[in-house]
Image (spheres, rainbow, N blue to C red):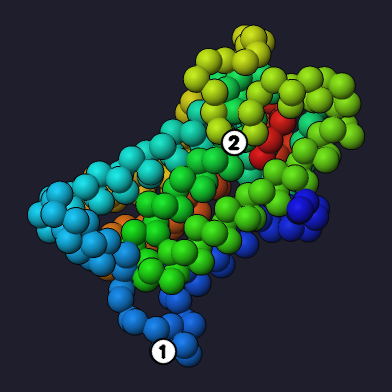
């Protein structure tokens, strides 16, 4: 279950296609499925029927969950990017001069992939139910494939050093305590935030617009965040300028 070099190179495009299909859910018309526009309302109704929450309380709980998932995804990706550099994270080839053992990499080996997957749960609230399941599952599988491809690459490139790191630090479920000592690397927070501006745009969208419970408005906020991120890429350092070693992209 390992991604090829070509799959890794086009991983961002693959993610984008999956997300667009999740929002569109074209199979609903073909399979004559219920054309519910988003997960949010049926999920709120289901919570109301438990008798624990009113409909407004359930809607607020789902908004809180969306904010938490979006925030967790943005924070993990920004924290991880700060120690790798945005140029390395955005590059189309794998890097591996040394094992990164600073920041989130002391607690979990793949904070970027974990952050991306958590982000999908926030987006899933805005998608039709079938599209949300499609996106969360397919992106989850794709993250595992990418992890498998990188682990093979890094094992061959770094040998015993990476094997020792693998043995101590969990792959996807973060430990509560650092499992390896830090090397003292400095985080580049400015370019990390710029590189993950899409993620933070989605956080702002949920926080500022979520209380209106308008799924189309929230989806537009996601689109605007993506547009801003595409513009921001022009201000990021080029891959050739990246100097940080990488244990994960």
Q: Is residue 228 visible?
A: no
In-front residue for pair 229/127: 127
Residue 67 screen position, x and y as percent: 30, 44
Quick check: 182 left or right of 189? right
Q: Which residue is mark 1?
A: 32
Label 1 Cα neighbours within 10 Å, binned few <14 / some 14-19 / many ≥20? few
Label 2 Cα neighbours within 10 Å, binned few <14 / some 14-19 / many ≥20? some
Q: Earlier in the sequence, mark 2 or mark 1?
A: 1
Residue 204 screen position, x and y as percent: 29, 45
Q: Which residue is found at the position 63% from the left and 44% from the top?
A: 90
Disc 2 versus disc 1: distance between alpha carbons? 37 Å
Residue 84 screen position, x and y as percent: 63, 29
Image vertical order of residue 197 relative to residue 220, above or below = above
| Label 1 residue SS | loop
Q: Quadrant of residue 45?
A: bottom left
Q: Which residue is found at the position 76% from the left and 41% from the top?
A: 150
Image vertical order of residue 26 relative to residue 134, above or below = below
Q: Which residue is mark 2?
A: 172
In-front residue for pair 233/155: 155
């Amino acid at each position: 279950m390992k991604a090829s070099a070509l799959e890794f190179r086009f991983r961002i495009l693959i993610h984008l296609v999956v997300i667009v299909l999740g929002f569109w859910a074209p199979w609903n018309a073909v399979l004559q499925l219920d054309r519910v526009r988003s997960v949010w309302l049926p999920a709120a109704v289901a919570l109301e029927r438990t008798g624990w929450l009113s409909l407004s309380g359930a809607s607020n709980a789902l908004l809180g969950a969306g904010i938490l998932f979006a925030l967790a995804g943005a924070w993990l990706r920004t924290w991880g990017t700060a120690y790798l550099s945005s140029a390395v994270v955005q590059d189309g080839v794998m890097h591996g001069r040394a094992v990164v053992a600073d920041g989130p990499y002391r607690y979990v080996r793949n904070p970027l992939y974990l952050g991306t997957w958590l982000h999908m749960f926030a987006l899933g609230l805005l998608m039709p139910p079938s599209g949300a399941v499609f996106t969360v599952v397919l992106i989850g599988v794709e993250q595992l494939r990418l992890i498998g491809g990188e682990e093979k690459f890094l094992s061959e490139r770094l040998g015993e050093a990476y094997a020792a790191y693998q043995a101590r630090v969990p792959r996807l479920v973060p430990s509560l305590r650092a499992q390896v000592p830090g090397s003292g690397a400095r985080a580049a927070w400015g370019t990390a935030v710029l590189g993950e501006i899409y993620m933070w745009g989605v956080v702002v969208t949920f926080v500022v617009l979520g209380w209106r419970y308008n799924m189309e408005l929230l989806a537009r906020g996601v689109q605007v965040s993506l547009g801003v991120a595409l513009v921001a890429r022009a201000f990021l350092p080029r891959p050739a300028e990246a100097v940080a070693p990488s244990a994960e992209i």
